[in-house]
Amino acid sequence: MPARKNSRADAVRTAATQAIEATAGQAAASTQRRAQQLAGDLSQAAGRFRDTLDDLRPPTGDDLRLLHERVAKLEARIAKLEGSGRAAPAKRKAPAKRGGSAKS
């Protein structure tokens, strides 16, 4: 009869080992999927953050120059559409350049 107890103990030990290995494998796969999801979420958040920083960036000198040119073209088109009977709008002075220090 002692041989039978050893075989039952071995069978229980083997079953327990298999159950633990199966659970560990499932947990590892679940952890890997979650890590991939988190990496994807982090990548998307970083992209949104970069876009937000670009939107908050102040305009460059080139941006302002292009806007000034577009406004001047629109003024000319409006003057043309309003008719040649009216005088063209006066030319605007270029905005004062900003200096490094303010003088009183």
Image: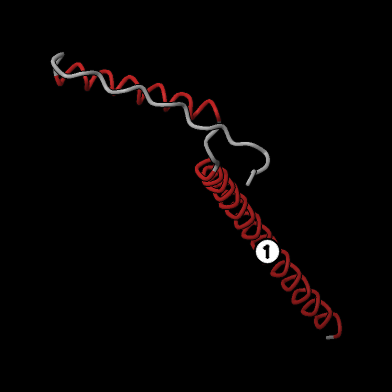
Q: Position of residue 89 (x, y in %)?
A: 27, 23
Q: Identify which residue is drawn at 32% across, 19% down.
A: 73
- How many marks overall? 1
The answer to whether residue 39 is left or right of residue 89 is: right
Above or below: residue 45 compared with residue 93: below
Residue placed most toward the observer, 21 or 58: 58
Farthest residue, direction top = 84
Residue 69 is drawn in which quadrant? top left
Tell me: residue 11, above or below residue 29: below
SS category of the residue bearing label 1: helix
Give percent across and percent down for residue 4: 80, 81
Q: Residues within 10 Å of mark 1 (few under 14, many from 20)?
A: few
Image quarter in which the N terminus is found: bottom right
Residue at far bottom of view? 1
Query: What amino acid is at disc 1?
Result: Ala
Query: Badge 1 is on which residue?
Result: 22
User: Residue, x 56% and y 45% (percent of image)?
Assistant: 53
Which residue reaches farthest right? 2
User: Which colour assignment does the render follow?
Assistant: secondary structure
- The residue that appears at 45% across and 24% down in the rendered structure is 66
Nearest to the observer: residue 91 or residue 6 = 91
| Camera-side residue of 92 and 58 | 92
Could you say where residue 86 lies in the image, as x and y percent from the top left?
16, 19
Q: Is residue 10 above or below residue 28?
A: below
Q: Position of residue 14 (x, y in %)?
A: 76, 70
In the image, taking residue 63 as reference, residue 34 lies left or right, namely right
The residue under the point 52% across, 32% down is 96
Res 25 quadrant in image: bottom right
